[in-house]
Amino acid sequence: NGRINTENTSMYDKDGLRVWASRAIQAGEEIYASYDKCKDCMDTDYYWGTPEILRDFGFVEPYPHRFVYTDQDIWFEVWES
């Protein structure tokens, strides 16, 4: 999403998962990572979106919100409210 300010290695790396800031982060600023745009997510953006994150993790990530309807071959993102 638009506010991600971290990068990470793969959770399958021999040294384990490492996460670091992708830019300077100010004191008190929230740290963001993505559950659907990660190194180990493979091609989830083609079949996994906002409803699936809500179902699997119980929350919705900040914008953009992705909606994927594979049966109807429909894929779109909503970038702001």
Image (cartoon, rainbow, N blue to C red):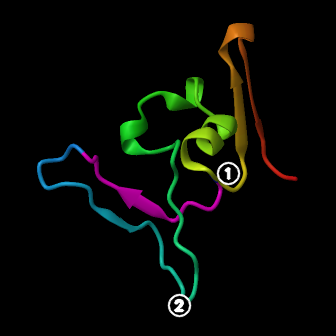
Q: Contact (CB < 8 A) between labels 1 and 2?
A: no
> Residue 63 at x, y = what percent?
72, 52
Q: Secondary structure at mark 1?
A: loop
Is residue 69 part of the magenta span, yes or no? Answer: no
Residue ranking furthest to the left: 14
At 18% from the left edge and 47% from the top edge, which residue is drawn?
Answer: 13
Residue ranking furthest to the right: 81
- For the residues labelled 1 and 2, the Cα–Cα distance comes to 25 Å
Marks 1, 2: nearer the viewer: 1
| Mark 1 closeness class: few <14, some 14–19, many ≥20 residues within 10 Å | some
> Label 2 amino acid?
Ala
Residue 34 versus residue 26: which sits nearer the camera? Answer: 34
Along the horizontal axis of the image, is 50 left or right of 12? right
What is the span of residues highlighted in magenta in the rendered image?
Answer: 2-11
Q: Secondary structure at mark 2?
A: loop
User: Where residue 78 is drawn, which disc sits there?
Assistant: none
Is residue 7 part of the magenta span, yes or no? Answer: yes
Residue 35 versus residue 2: which sits nearer the camera? Answer: 35
Quickly name the residue at label 1: 60
> Residue 2 at x, y = what percent?
65, 56
Quickly name the residue at label 2: 27
Q: How many marks?
A: 2
Along the horizontal axis of the image, is 46 left or right of 18? right
Residue 79, above or below 62: above
